[in-house]
Amino acid sequence: MLTALWQRLDRNPPLFFDDQLEPALAGARDQVFGMGLLRQGQPSRNAACPDCGYGCRVVWESNERTGARVAFLSCRTCGPIEVEPDRLRQWAIDVPQLLAAVKAAGRISGSVSEVVEGHLWHLGTAVWGRRREVYFLRCAHERVRAPVTSAIKTHPKAVLLFPDEAAAHRWGSATDNPVFALDSVVTLAAEGLAFDAAAVTDLLADAQPSDSAKPCPRRSGRVADIAKLTEAMVAFLRGARDHAFATEGLAGTPELLPRPTKTQLAKETNVPKSRVTRCFKDKSARELRLYWKTAVDLPTVMNFKGPTSTGPE
Ligand SMILES: [Zn+2]
C-alpha cells in the first residue's frame, strides 16, 4: 500500500502532485495524512501542457476585475493556457515525521541525527538479534556515496535502510553493510506503521556466515542456485514484456503474464523448493527479489531492459 510513498521518498524533491495521490496511495491516503506523513508544499512551478504534454513554466497573474490569482502555462507551441490551481498543488513527504514513525515501528531507540544533509540519517540503535546501529539513506547518487561511506565506515555492521529495493539494489556493494528496503519490511497496519523485525532479524542471522572469509560449500551452492533462479526470472520478465507489448498491439490493452509461483520456479530450475525459499531470503539475492517484485507490476515489466548487474560480484 505504501510502495508509491517509498518510491517517491527516493526522489528529490519527494513530492506528489494532488492528482497523483489517489492512484498512488488509494485506500492508505487518509491514514497517511492522519499520521502527518504528507504536508502541503509550494504550488508547482512547472506542469505539463494539457494539449501537447510539453513541460511548461507556470506564470501567476491577478485577474484585473476580481483580483483572483490565475495560473497560466506558457507553452512554447500552444501559447498561454490557463491551468486549474488544484492541478499545481503538491504534497511533500515529511521526512523527519516519516523517520520518526519508522523508528517507533522498528523500536529503534535514540535520537535521530542528519549525518549527510538530505541523504543520510543515523536513526539510533535496535536489537535485531543483537544490537545494531541503524541508518537511513535516500537518493544515494554517485556524488553522495563518498560522504556516506566515510560517515559509516566506522560502523561496518550497521544496518542501512533504503526506501525501496531498487534503491538498495543501486547501493549494491558500495559498502558491506547489511541493507534493507523499507518497502519490504514496513507495512501499514491499523495502528500505524508495522515493522517486520522478525524478518530483519532472520535475514541478519542468515547473512552471518558470509561475514567469514572462508568459503563454505553450502554457501557456494546457494550462490549457484540464486544465479539459476535470477536467470529464470530474467527470462520470464523478457517474455512477459514481449507478451505485454504484443497484447497491447492486438487488443489495445497490455496484458500481464501471471508470475510463476516459487514451486514452478523450483521445477523449472531444478532447485529444490526448500532451497528456493532460502535463496529468496539470502542477503545476496537482492536482484532476484527485485525481479520477483517487478514481475507483478505491469509498467515496470514493460520497461524491463534486462539484468542490471554486469556479472557476478
Ligand atoms: Zn502545449
Image (cartoon, rainbow, N blue to C red):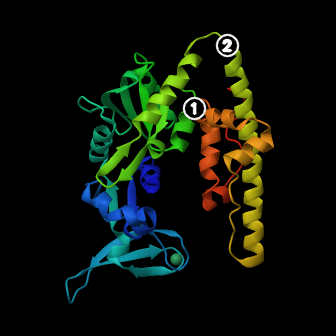
Where is residue 262 drawn, in percent x and y? 68, 45
**Mark 2: amino acid:** Pro
The answer to whether 82 is drawn above or below residue 165 in the figure is below
Residue at mark 1: 172
Q: Is residue 253 visible?
A: yes
Using the image as rendered, state which of residue 124 and residue 309 is in the foreground: 124
Residue at mark 2: 215
Q: Quadrant of the C terminus?
A: top right
Q: Name which quarter of the figure residue 71 lies in.
A: bottom left
Residue count near mark 2 (Cα–Cα under 10 Å), binned few <14, some 14–19, many ≥20 = few
Q: Residue at x 80, y 37 (%)?
A: 270
Q: Secondary structure at mark 1?
A: loop
Using the image as rendered, state which of residue 188 and residue 120 is in the foreground: 188
Q: Secondary structure at mark 2?
A: loop
Disc 1 to disc 2, C-alpha distance: 21 Å
The answer to whether 303 is drawn above or below residue 220 in the figure is below
Residue count near mark 1 (Cα–Cα under 10 Å), binned few <14, some 14–19, many ≥20 = some
Left or right: where 270 falls relative to 134: right
Where is residue 154 drawn, in percent x and y? 40, 15
Q: Nearer the viewer, mark 1 or mark 2?
A: 2
Whether label 1 touches label 2, CB < 8 Å: no
Say which label, 1 or 2, has the lower sequence index: 1
